[in-house]
Image (cartoon, rainbow, N blue to C red):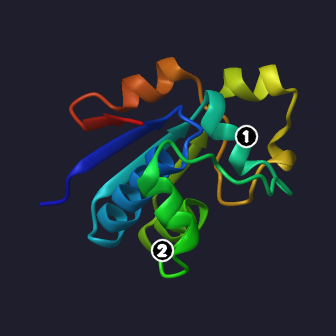
Amino acid sequence: MARRINIVCVSGTRERLQMAGMIASVAAASGDEVSVFFSMNALAYFVKGADEQAPAEGHFGELMESNTGVPPFKQLFKFAAEMGDAKLLPCSMAIDLLELGQDDLEPELGEPTGLTVFLGDSAGAQLLTF
């Protein structure tokens, strides 16, 4: 039976975004229903043309940066959306604060979504926060 996994990403650090991306991609590829809500510091990495690297929180983040065998978190989220049909949802409040439009975001991100709607849709699902 497929699980429903909803992930909230608010952190802008490499380790947290990496773990959220790993969970999203593995769960989606396994047939689970996955929704990821990007807000606050996490959303900035999904603006078209954003090439800034997420800072490492500690030693493990530094190891991931230097190891070319570790797929970057953006690639993991893209895989989750393309191969597993995960929903990648930008926070409407964060979009407003950053003065962005839908066309400013990476194409795999869906329609801007409010937190109230996301939490309502998350009822009965596993909810993880990074």
The disc, 1 or 2, on the residue closer to the chain's N-terminal end is 1
Where in the figure is residue 75, as x and y percent of width and height? 58, 68
Where disc 1 sits, the SS reads: helix
Q: Does residue 114 appear left or right of residue 1 in this picture?
A: right
Query: In the picture provided, is 5 more to the left or to the right than 79?
Result: left
Residue 66 x %, y %: 56, 71
Q: Residue at x 58, y 42 (%)?
A: 89
At 19% across and 59% down in the image, what residue appears? 2
Residue at mark 1: 44
Residue 58 vertical placement versus 123 (above, below) = below
For label 2, the residue is 70
User: In the image, residue 83 lies at what x, y percent?
Assistant: 47, 75
Kind of residue at badge 1: Ala
Can you give x and y, in whole percent of width and height, for residue 98 in the image? 82, 27
Q: Amino acid at mark 2?
A: Val
Q: Which of these two is toward me, 60 or 33?
A: 60
